[in-house]
């Protein structure tokens, strides 16, 4: 389909390694486009030779490219999955709907402000509609004004939730965890699935296929923490999973995003560069001080993504902090994965600040306002039923204006 001199078409995923193949051109485009618009830092992606790496683990996915004079000048990715729809008014909680995710929108700098980005999104929405998708979502940092203007002001997306992306560098020294007070154990996949379904099924955008995520080779496992004087029985003969309502516990799962793609820091404040280099020099001169060193983020690095974070009970934020420190120490000691240089955790912006403070992170590398936006596709699916469309728009407005009961579930396949 042609728009104003450029063509929108499907990405051709084949083995052609030539200079003008879709694969080569998309990889080159990714290298030229930074992630986000932060004035402090920006990142470049390294897809490890696979342009579709970020969506390949999704149940359904598609990539579109914009082509001008046989040159790929824009790209967008989309995925589809079934999630539990849990607004506070009808349809009732537990209803499964299809949600499409808009990912990886890139337009080459010389071709921006020509409507290519909007055309790519609209074509991807058409693909969503053809597969009976009810809603589509996207996320962008607060500082990414161009992206938010496109989706909210131009394409009628609605700000839905605010997330906080907390990034913690993998240090050269481990964190101390009070093992005399806190117990951390790795869960079996079936136990993790049972706990998630019991305690997080009402979480917004909770995936129906949670078991497939936990069984994926990129999922490194699930861990639970509790205070040693308390107990959370994982299984019994009478019930799948249960627990003492008064006990405190926390759970996290871990996804090895570094096996899918890598990141590279493109810019950082001069003072930060001087600070990190000075630490390395001082550590060589005075190793007895055991200074905490920062990894070299200017070279491609991998990261672990913490997902399925949930906690209940008094002081359970401390248990989350212990789990995040445990994950850091595991990454630091993993001799098989020297490329893991950061731990990334996303929590809801509606979470208590106490939780944010318990999770180790660097403010400079983190994003405290990651805007999630949503759009109903009922208008495209039901063009001939105006009343139903307005009813659905009213419903989604009520949903987005109501504070969430539980935190937002961030699927690691859409990171």
Image (cartoon, rainbow, N blue to C red):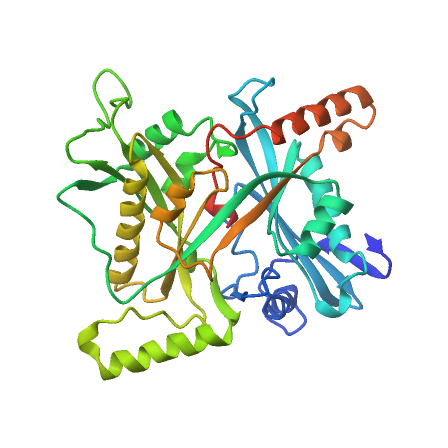
Residue shown at 30% from the left, 32% from the top: 190
Q: Quadrant of residue 125 in the image?
A: top right
Q: In this view, does 234 lie to the left or right of 389?
A: left
Vertically, is 85 above or below 73? Answer: above
Residue 101: tell me if it is visible.
no
Q: Is residue 123 left or right of residue 293?
A: right
Q: Is residue 388 left or right of residue 324?
A: right
Decide which of 245, 65 is in the foreground and name it. 245
Residue shown at 23% from the left, 36% from the top: 226
- The outermost residue toward the right is 4
Decide which of 270, 151 is in the foreground and name it. 270
Decide which of 163, 139 is in the foreground and name it. 163
| Number of marks in picture | 0
Q: Quadrant of residue 99 in the image?
A: top right
Residue shown at 83% from the left, 24% from the top: 384
x and y percentages locating residue 315 in the rendered image: 29, 35
Q: Is residue 108 left or right of residue 206?
A: right
Residue 324: tell me if it is visible.
yes
Q: Quadrant of residue 130 in the image?
A: top right
x and y percentages locating residue 227 in the rendered image: 20, 36
Decide which of 174, 334 is in the foreground and name it. 174
Residue shown at 59% from the left, 46% from the top: 371
x and y percentages locating residue 271 in the rendered image: 46, 75
- The outermost residue toward the top is 238
């Amino acid at each position: 389909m042609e728009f104003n001199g450029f063509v929108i078409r499907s990405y051709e995923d084949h083995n052609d390694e030539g200079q003008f193949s879709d694969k080569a051109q998309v990889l080159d485009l990714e290298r030229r486009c930074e992630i986000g618009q932060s004035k402090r830092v920006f990142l470049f992606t390294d897809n490890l030779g696979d342009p579709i790496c970020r969506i390949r683990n999704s149940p359904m996915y598609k990539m579109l490219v914009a082509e001008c004079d046989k040159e790929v000048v824009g790209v967008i990715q989309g995925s589809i999955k079934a999630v539990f729809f849990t607004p506070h008014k009808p349809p009732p909680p537990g209803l499964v709907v299809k949600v499409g995710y808009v990912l990886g929108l890139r337009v080459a700098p010389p071709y921006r402000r020509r409507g290519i980005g909007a055309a790519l999104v609209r074509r991807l929405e058409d693909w969503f509609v053809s597969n009976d998708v009810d809603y589509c979502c996207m996320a962008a940092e607060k500082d990414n004004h161009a992206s938010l203007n496109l989706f909210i002001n131009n394409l009628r997306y609605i700000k839905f939730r605010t997330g906080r992306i907390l990034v913690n560098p993998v240090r050269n020294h481990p964190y101390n965890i009070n093992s005399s007070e806190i117990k951390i154990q790795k869960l079996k996949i079936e136990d993790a699935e049972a706990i998630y379904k019991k305690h997080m099924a009402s979480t917004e955008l909770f995936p129906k296929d949670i078991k497939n995520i936990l069984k994926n080779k990129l999922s490194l496992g699930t861990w639970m923490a509790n205070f040693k004087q308390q107990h959370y029985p994982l299984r019994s003969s009478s019930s799948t999973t249960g627990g003492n309502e008064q006990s405190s516990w926390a759970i996290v799962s871990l996804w090895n995003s570094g096996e899918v793609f890598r990141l590279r820091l493109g810019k950082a404040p001069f003072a930060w560069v001087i600070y990190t280099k000075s630490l390395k020099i001082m550590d060589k001169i005075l190793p007895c001080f055991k200074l905490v060193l920062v990894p070299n983020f200017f070279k491609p690095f991998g990261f672990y993504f913490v997902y399925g974070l949930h906690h209940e009970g008094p002081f359970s934020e401390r248990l989350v902090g212990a789990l995040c420190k445990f994950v850091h120490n595991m990454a630091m000691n993993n001799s098989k994965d020297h490329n893991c240089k950061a731990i990334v955790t996303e929590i809801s912006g509606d979470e208590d600040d106490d939780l944010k403070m318990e999770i180790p992170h660097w403010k400079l590398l983190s994003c405290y306002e990651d805007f999630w936006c949503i759009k109903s596709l009922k208008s495209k699916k039901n063009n001939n039923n105006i009343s139903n469309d307005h009813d659905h728009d009213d419903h989604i407005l009520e949903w987005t204006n109501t504070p969430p009961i539980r935190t937002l579930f961030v699927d690691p396949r859409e990171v």
